[in-house]
Image (spheres, grey):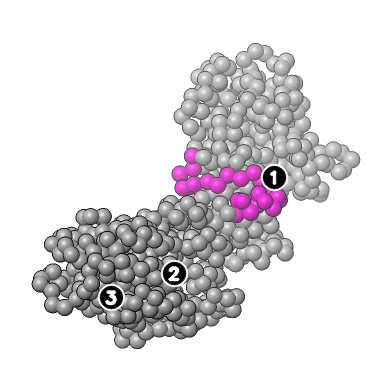
Amino acid sequence: MKVMQLLPALELGGTERGVVDLARAMKKEGHATVVVSSGGALVAELQKMGIPHYGLPVHQKSLAAFFLVEELVKIIQRERVDIIHARSRVPAWIGWLAARKTGVPFITTCHGHYSVHLMSFVMGWGKRVIVASHAIGRRMIDEFNVPPDRIRLIPRGVDLSQFTFSFAKFEKHKGPMRIVHIGRFSPAKGQVEFLKAVHLLRSRLPHFEVWIVGSEGRGKHRYTDLMKKTVHQFGLESCVKILPPTRDVAGLLAQADLLVLSSLIPEPFGRVIIEAGAVGTPVAATWLGGVPDIIDHNENGLLFPPKNIPAMAEAMYELLTDREKAKNFAVKLRKKVEEKFNLEQMVRKTIEVYQEVRKRRKILVIKLGAMGDLILVVPSLRMLRERFPDASITLLVDRKLAPIVSACPYLNDMILVDRKKLSNLFYLLKTARRVRREGFDISVDLHNNKWTHLLAYLGGVIQRFGFSRGKWGFLLNRPDRTFEVGDSPIRHQFRVLSKAGVIKFDDALELWPKPADLEKAKEAITTLEPKEHTKIVGFVMGSSPNWPSKRWPADHFVNLAKRLLEKYDARIVLIGSPQEADLAKPFYSFKSGAVLDLTGKTALEELPAFFKQFHLVVTGDTAPLHVAAAMNIPTVALFGPTDAKRHVPPGKRLDVLSHHLPCQPCYSGTCKIKETQACLTHISVEEVFEHCQRMLGS
């Protein structure tokens, strides 16, 4: 596995040292690392380990940074990177865009307490969002709408072999006590407030010295000047030294009697605290952010409220004067670091995240069409599950149709939408935001219109598969351009699936009736008082409202029923929607107990259970035909204006009747020739009855 670490620079900060430690440890584990940054003092350390570093100005907070995307894409492809791991906002934007172009999984680590604005949201767009503390995890969930299942808590860890614990600093002291403050020079880190606390401390403890270690970064000096001005203002020149960053943080901390962290905003974690714990230096720190994950107040260190200068001075005084307490705190902190904040644990958990992202893909299947079309998607769901057994598969579906596949064992989740509202821009954006929150790797668009293409694109799906149709096809980055090539429904879908990596074709339909629905169906059929050899025949007389041309004449159904009653003492069950209730009226004259009228009386999800009770179904080209095929019920299917080759569902017990007139297929909802619906009226009752006999006999 090869992971790209993407961060602004490789100076001597905690984030940067953590990246170097992780790269070293991953190399020992047999994994490779590529680092991209603008450079810095730690590049040489990477090069000594033989770890590639690419220098790009990914630190620049300007629109010019987006021109680096293509360059990063080339590096990703050249190095054959498996994971992109971004650790700051500008690099994350560049990495996220490169990930969309290359299809490489993208993850983030939140090293900051980010303000809520557009530039920050990208840190929550990773397939996994690593946080170092509970506080940052909660903020990413509450303020950046990151789903909790994408958050991974991995505390920072240190290589304990590089830190020697010593009791020497707690023995009789030679010379003044030394307080150290390490961190980037910034108002957020509170160095000025720290200096004010030092001023208060000096009135009670005159002999000590202070080292403030860090820098503002390249070309910046305003806050450093303010620190120097504060030192002069309080006359602290004799005890305060402002020092540049150092690689030897362990050595620096080993020389200190106390580490102080004075941050004014929540720290994501506080790596320097665990480094202090590793060498046995007591800690006093701000009670904010991730610090309480490490320091248990008055157990292994002291915490004080942010901006409370007297409380900070009091904490420093207590730990510098009560050395037995300070020693006890240091021992307990070292033990906690050994148990919870060691490098091995951090590396193991990070690699687990990488492997999880590579192995457990998130796949979005989009199908918003009619019920029959949705049933035809089931084989595709099964093929995807067999190809990607560990994947999380979600179906984006019209909420009215979702019940028909609610029990599908190949799905992990469904996103329910109102298909008719997708043309509303606000509803579309709201739905796309829901899709984006899920962080899908792959979308398989089996609906293929501009709205579904837009959903996948705006939803940030990395690899978007589907048929490229018309001017909106450019939104797919893995398109199939053979939509117009005729084929059976499942094989048509398979062309898209094969581009997504599915190899084995399987077109068997399935549906899963619920036990309660089966009981309801059995009870309904018993009202017909069937005998042992009675045949239960389902009639589907209607069609969707836009396709009256698909209906075999009602009087033909009536005459067919009479033939079946005479031959088999059959029972007829009428299936249809509430709008088709009038089609059942001609059957009211039949003798009692011969016909069960269920038009408008069954929910979508109940249909499979009722069809399971039938010995035969007679239907036109409409959704219940697919239900019958999925339940493996002998079926006589009557095709008129549509092409059976393209629309008949797969099934071994289907008998198709079509007369193949010159006007067929017309794909028109209303017949436009003189002899209305000749394609279906020419199918005689006798023909259908003969096919029924054959299917019942089989």
Q: Gap in Å between the C-alphas at discs 2 and 3?
A: 19 Å
Total count of labels: 3
Asked whether, in this view, residue 662 is left or right of residue 310, the answer is right
Which one is in front, 80 or 65? 65
Q: At x 46% / y 47%, what residue is drawn?
A: 412
Compared with 366, 405 (above or below) is above
Residue 203: x %, y % from top left: 27, 68
Q: At x 64% / y 39%, what residue is drawn?
A: 623
Chain-order first, disc 1 or disc 3: 3
Q: Which mark is residue 210?
A: 3
Amino acid type, residue under disc 3 in the picture: Val
Q: Write down the region rendered in magenta.
A: 407-432
Q: Nearer the viewer, mark 1 or mark 3?
A: 3
Residue 475: x %, y % from top left: 64, 64
Q: Nearer the viewer, mark 1 or mark 2?
A: 2
Asked whether, in this view, residue 10 is left or right of residue 365, the answer is left
Which one is in front, 577 or 40? 40
Q: Gap in Å between the C-alphas at discs 1 and 2?
A: 52 Å
Q: Residue furthest right?
A: 674
| Residue identified by numbered label 2 | 187
Do callouts 1 and 3 mark residues in contact (Cβ within 8 Å)? no
Quick check: can you spot residue 232? yes
Amino acid type, residue under disc 1 in the picture: Lys
**Which quadrant holds the N terminus?**
bottom left
Chain-order first, disc 1 or disc 2: 2
Which one is in front, 333 or 637? 333
Q: Residue furthest left?
A: 172
Q: At x 66% / y 35%, what residue is drawn?
A: 619
Residue 427, magenta (yes or no)? yes
| Residue identified by numbered label 1 | 420
Amino acid type, residue under disc 2 in the picture: Pro
